[in-house]
Image (tube, helix red, strand yellow):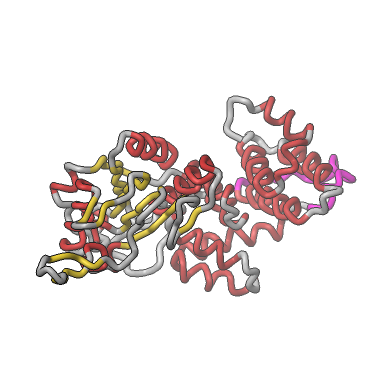
Amino acid sequence: MKPSKALQIIQSVLKGGNAPFLLGGTGIGKSAIVRELADILADKREVVIDTIKPTKNQFGFIDFRLSLYESVDLGGLPYIDDQGGQKRAFLGNLPVEGEGLLFFDEYAQAHPSVQAVVGQLIYEKRLGEYAMPKGWKIICAGNRATDRAGSNKLPSHVIGRTSLINFEHDTNDWLTWAVKNDVQADILGFIQYQPEWLNIFDSKVMKPQPSPRSWVRLSDTLKTAPPQELWQMIAESDIGETGAIEFCSFVSLKEGVPNLDDIVNGEMFHEVEVVDNIGMMYATVVALATVMKEANSKVVGRYFENALAYIKKFPTPEYSIFFVRSIINMRSELIETSTYSEFKVEHQDLEV
């Protein structure tokens, strides 16, 4: 199931009072989609998110990476009270008020004793004296046993008490998410150009491999503007040697794109050669997007009009759609331009 559909289903399951369980491969965006849902729910309530000690006036999002926890971290430490009764002292990491999402990630990698504690919380909404506030919902996530990521087989009582959602990566969904979350432009262009490189996971290979998570990690590093001669070595640390070579080969194509100033200024528009190589077309779109992102607000509207007119000369509309989607996220003021309005009319049957 692709992420956009999974997000809708998760919301429906939660509304029904049940706990969704996301099952999927390593690094494909399970955690990211749950965080996106938390942002959506907080925005609807017009409150801010707190991830540590949310109050009644905030929306909580508490993320437990269960593979790092012991059962006492959640289930509490047993002790004998003054009357000789057995009670538990909780460590204060579970919510006591308000509303929010309790996200139990890496469930399948957790120790069985930890899984048992979470299973009790899912089913009974309480642990001993602790009762989960009514405004809080539980979401679980984990890898499948077939992913060979150190996952244990899910206990039958968890399968019976949660709504299992099989989660698969989807390139279009990821690109939509990546544009909204300001993933570095060269990465966007490369994945649009060669989508098979978004997620290549082999459990037998103990080296960095491309995944949605590793591309985001690489994006964070590249946005710090390291010297270009280091990019391949940096990329190798996140997506592996072969992926880094392919990615940097794509990036190098920008050296051969037409004169960008001529394109955005429209001064020599009819004389600018239109590239006809697929990789070069995507590289040109990325290069123009970078110019647009940095353009002065006084000229960005004109640049947008001229750049889009040039890209429309490419053989299919996917290039102009990719360009517009990227630019609107970077420069939201362009939504008010006639150029954008006309483009939306031309492509009203396509997602922009």
Question: Which is more toward the observer, 29 or 122?
Answer: 122
Residue 81: give x, y in percent of width and height.
Answer: 16, 70
Residue 36: give x, y in percent of width and height.
Answer: 47, 48
Question: Residue visible at 63% across and 72% down?
Answer: 226
Q: Is residue 228 above or below residue 283?
A: below
Specify the quadrant that holds the N terminus.
Answer: top left
Question: Residue visible at 40% across and 63% down?
Answer: 209
Quarter of image, res 153: bottom left
Question: Which is more toward the observer, 248 or 167?
Answer: 167
Left or right: 340, with 63 as reference point: right
Left or right: 274, with 60 as reference point: right
Question: Which is more toward the observer, 91 or 34?
Answer: 91
Looking at the rendered structure, the number of numbered marks drawn on it comes to 0
Residue 192: give x, y in percent of width and height.
Answer: 55, 47
Residue occupying the far right of the picture: 267
Q: What stretch is highlighted in magenta?
A: 260-278
Quarter of image, res 95: bottom left
Question: Residue visible at 32% across and 69% down?
Answer: 206
Quarter of image, res 90: bottom left
Q: Is residue 307 above or below residue 111?
A: above
Residue occupying the far front of the picture: 83
Question: Which is more toward the observer, 121 or 30?
Answer: 121
Residue 4 shown in magenta:
no
Residue 57: give x, y in percent of width and height.
Answer: 50, 50
Left or right: 135, with 159 as reference point: right
Specify the quadrant that holds the C terminus.
Answer: top right
Left or right: 241, with 341 as reference point: left
Residue 273 shown in magenta:
yes
Question: Residue visible at 34% across and 60% down?
Answer: 64
